[in-house]
Image: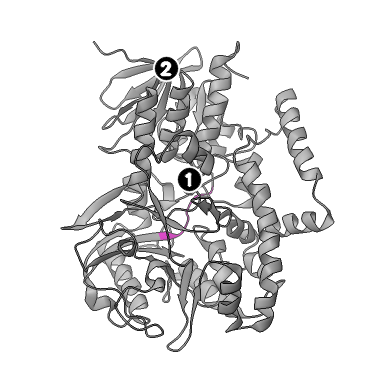
Amino acid sequence: MTDTSYDVAIIGGGHNGLTCAAYLARAGLKVVVLEAHDVVGGAAVTESFAPGFRNSVASYTVSLLNPKVISDLELARHGLRIVERPAANFWPIDGERSLLMPYGLANRQKAIAQFSARDAERLPAYDAALERAADLLRDLVLRTPPNVGGGIAEIVRGARLARRLRGLNVEGWRLVTDLFTKSAADFLDQWFESDIVKAAFAFDGIVGAYASPHTPGTAYVLLHHCFGEVNGKPGVWGHAVGGMGAISEAMASSARAAGAQIRTKARVAKLRMAGGWVAGVVLESGEEIRARAVASGIGPKLLFRSIVPQDAVAPELRERFLHIKTGSGTFRMNVALLELPDFTTRPGTNKQPHHGAGIIIGPTIDYLDRAYLDARREGWSREPVVEMLIPSTLDDSLAPPSQHVASLFVQHVAPQLPTPRTWANGHEKEGFADLVIETVTKHAPNFKASVIARQVLSPLDLETRFGLIDGDIFHGQLSLDQLFSARPVLGHADYRLPVPGLYLCGSGAHPGGGVTGAPGHNAAREIIRDLKSKWRWK
């Protein structure tokens, strides 16, 4: 007979749930991961979408995966290999101009100088400023935020943070204030004059934000996408060989090696309660699993909507969780290609550095702004913002010889279309997918004809398949009122939820979304503190 009693049961086998499980098991705790689908990974999975063609389904690129997590969990030993893009990003602008952003300061200055000599001169100071801010953020990523009104433990946490911030000079404080309050457009106006150069940097400020580059707070989103590294190289982007599912598989292997159990096709229906405390979970099959604590890798909004009993928390607090702002405004596609795109500004279907970069269609600040305004009015933009990666240029396991796969990640797509339209209508989804392909084809005339198969995921598909409410890739928007001590809500930023014994280990917790492993790492630390201490709850 199987023993169904554990120290910790984890709801969801996404990458953060697996990270949390690995750390808990390494600490000697008995852990089970309960994944509803037949494979682990959540949104970080790789699958075949056409004969001979495989790709990452939802999450799609590597940069934010925390180096401590990679090292601690020995992910390389468990099969993970990350290769670097040959260049960062490529922007087709019009029929004559484009911007290829290489690595290395001197090379980037040379690229930018095509559009503004002044901007090229300003780049070193901009890089230095952003790196100072990124250093602060990297330090905060693996810290537990202080809880507002949380007593002596939180006062201590706040004091530690204060000591870290005390080292900032006036200029440092100005920078931090700008990044946490200003729009990406306003922030970049302080540094650059070329609209094309500003747009190149502003793109990171609108990814997953469903906001105009003029929206206050998008400067922080820009920073959030800039603090990553690949293979020890800050600012470099990479590809996991085998797709993003390879990250999840390596994490699962690490967790199992440490002693964690992982069960698939084990959908959690509700929490098991005893005396007001979490005592495990009940599966949809009716099976009860006993546990001293439960950690949730799914979004907090979905958790409180579907799994936490109605009477487990006060109605007002429950409403706060149910009204977490969600909706990243994103649309996801994978396409199978007969050949590489032949861009007007960089002709040829032979593999070139720009084919291995992030290919971004969003050439000006005005273009990014119009796309958002269109989406607010019409549900999507007439000129979508598209980021395309062609990972088969780096990983020939994903496509047949001489053929390729491309991922297309589209911004500014309304989570709900204006009534009576709906994403449940296949004509809406496929119609917009057609527009996305036409948008790329304007810059690479052979693109549409080269597409032989496609996989299309609307915001509704992302919610239905991966539990991402409103298609939100971050489990909750990275807005100023949902960051750090306010993530997921004020008073519960320390990974402990208002149901005793229930923890949050997914992207809805600090530091937020992206394939980082940081929320899983941080939540595991707090769970270990509680279960290994005299008092289980604090």
Image location of residue 399, percent across then percent down: 23, 61
Image location of residue 495, percent across then percent down: 56, 31
Q: Which residues are magenta?
A: 325-330
Q: Is residue 435 left or right of residue 145?
A: left
Quarter-of-image position of residue 426: bottom left
Neighbour class for label 2 at 10 Å: few (<14), some, many (≥20)? many
First of labels 1, 2 by sequence position? 2
Q: Secondary structure at mark 1?
A: loop
Front-most of residues 314 and 148: 148
Q: Is residue 519 left or right of residue 286?
A: right
Relative height, residue 185 to residue 422 (above, below): below
Magenta span has 526? no
Q: Is residue 49 left or right of residue 485?
A: left
Say whether residue 270 is visible.
Answer: no
Which residue is identified by label 1?
Answer: 475
Q: Residue furthest left?
A: 51
Magenta span has 327? yes
Mark sitting on residue 291: 2
Q: Main secondary structure of the magenta part?
A: loop
Front-most of residues 332 and 467: 332
Q: Which amino acid type is shown beneath numbered disc 1? A: His
**Residue found 50% across the figure and 12% down from its top:** 275
Front-most of residues 88 and 267: 88
State if disc 2 and disc 1 touch (CB < 8 Å): no
Quadrant of the frame with the C terminus = top right
Relative height, residue 362 to residue 421 (above, below): below
For the residues labelled 1 and 2, the Cα–Cα distance comes to 25 Å
Quarter-of-image position of residue 281: top left
Q: Secondary structure at mark 2?
A: strand
Quadrant of the frame with the N terminus = top left
Q: Which amino acid type is shown beneath numbered disc 2? A: Ala
Neighbour class for label 1 at 10 Å: few (<14), some, many (≥20)? many
